[in-house]
Amino acid sequence: MIPDFSKYADIVAKLKHKIREARLQAALTINAQMLAIYWEIGNTIAEQEKTEGWGKKIVDTLAKDLKAEFPEMRGFSPRNLRYMRDFAMVYPHFAILQTMPARSEHIEENLILQEQLAKLSWYHHTTLLDKIKDEKERQFYIEQTVVNGWSRDIMVHQIESGLYKRQGQISSNFSHTIPLEQSELVQQIFKDPYKFDFIYLGEEAKERDLEDALTNQLTKFLLELGQWFSFMGRQYKMVLGENEYFFDLLFYHTRLKRYIVIDLKIDEFRPEYKGKMEFYLNLADDQLKTIGDEPSIGLILCKTKDGLVAEYALRDSNKPIGIAEYKINENLPDNIKGELPTIEELEAEIEKGYEELKSPVQKRFESIKEIVSKLQGDELKQQATTGILFDIIDTSVLPLYHLLAKRIDEFKEWFLFVNYKWQSTKGNFTDINQLAEEWKNEELLKNNFELNMWCNLSSFKKAGTETFNVFLGVDFKIDTNWYGFVIRGVNNQQPIVKKLYHEQLSKADMEYIIDIAATYIMDRIESQIEYLKKQ
């Protein structure tokens, strides 16, 4: 099929128009809007490939045209446009559902999916498109990423570890020991097998060696366990009468409100392990559980297990117990596992020799370096550029000023007049729509360091001949490394909100600024009313 190039200009013009519209949407829905416009672009490409025979060259041309029209925007590479096409094909209802009422269960499910998709970054989505082809598996990782707040790298780790096939596969008796409304959730929290590929153990390793390895790599261990597991201790001592007992590992699950007792076994599961765990759970429930806590759960981690034996062992137990295998790193021959020093031991020896060679100056430098690494706070990632400031005016400043004006308008009924004015280095103007035009001029932007919003509520109606005015000034300030918002007469003229240039205003930031501004107006009104009462 020969492509019809006569339609190309119209298609590109429509896409440019949609992009401009999307960029002007409120910052509160910026990711959803971005995904929506990506879907529009991808769907257009997919339809034109099907009906008009578009190929690689036309997509490359489209990428160049979009980059030329929107030079400050990223994401219009040919490769990314093809990701957009794949995204539209994988989620065909994404954009349509934005305006469709939920009239059926199927539509409601798709609306839930759309909401989840909007919570993931585009980097997450391209990774899922590359790595996961099965629809159900992709949906699983979308849900888990949203619930757990995984970064893209952690999501990749979970995909590569095969979490989809392991989640909820544990042998357990949860269905008849935990109330129905929670048993399925508990089942899904545990896995089988657990992947401990960050540790090495030899043939002669003991259970204490496994415990040492897991607690020495606690961060990775917690990542494998999943979200909401809080580490309480290892060899956790419990006293009953004159005897002491020790839990190998003890966790508290903050969502389930249950203690999790883990018993580590270096060999195959045996039925008698279940009896020991029941005893441990009795201890935990009697001595650890408090008001608001649910009964404790036991997790027996074994090197191997026979599923039928595990099923029979748990059949008559009234304590919630799960039995799972664990897999350690198997890249080394069995006869030398455990014989080689660990990475931590090697690093310690190297560090020891290095410390002996350091000069006093170098030692001081290392000390300061350590102090700096422990400092709390956000890290500077970039300075102000025109492109960044273009985005900030679209996604932070304009939405804030619109919402702020809407809040100020609530005071209109008390005053005869409410007037707005914006002031920059260039001069004054009274139309908020001129803001974008003002700030999208690169040459003018180089000489602008702040943008001031003024609001004058004048002629208080109820004061009769003794009317008064209220002035509100909100300044958008630009610094080398940060931007911020100042309310005149508040906080000694210092910014009440400051942001680094890789950050946008959040919904909470906007609400905070608007609340402070409204409070300032109300304070001024009350002050003037009190003054009038005294006259």
Image (cartoon, rainbow, N blue to C red):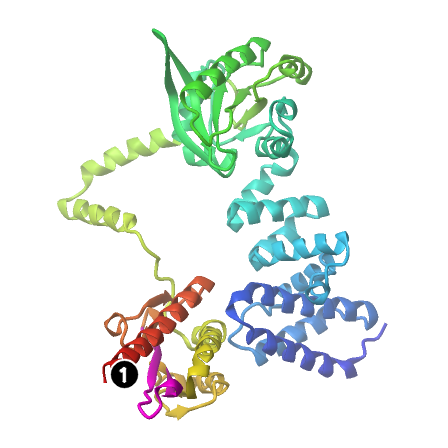
Question: Residue at (39%, 29%) from the top-left corner?
Answer: 232
Residue 310: give x, y in percent of width and height. Answer: 64, 16
Q: Is residue 471 magenta?
A: yes
Q: Classify residue 96 by image quadrant.
A: bottom right
Q: Name the residue under label 1.
A: 532
| 252 sits left or right of 47 in the view | left
Vertical order, 353 against 274 (above or below): below
**Residue 70 locus on image (x, y percent):** 56, 78
Query: In the figure, 495 relative to 351: above or below?
Result: below
- Can see residue 342? no
Q: Is residue 350 magenta?
A: no
Residue depicted at 49% across the width and 86% down the height: 437
- Secondary structure under the numbered disc 1 in the rendered image: helix
Helix, strand or loop: magenta stretch: strand
Residue type, numbered disc 1: Leu
Q: In which quarter of the image is residue 36?
A: bottom right
Magenta residues (range): 453-479
User: In percent of the image, x 69 and y 69: which residue is there?
Assistant: 40
In this view, the residue in front, 34 or 509, is: 509
Given residues 348 and 51, the one toward you in this image is 51
Above-or-below relation of 370 to 336: below
Image vertical order of residue 279 relative to residue 481, above or below: above
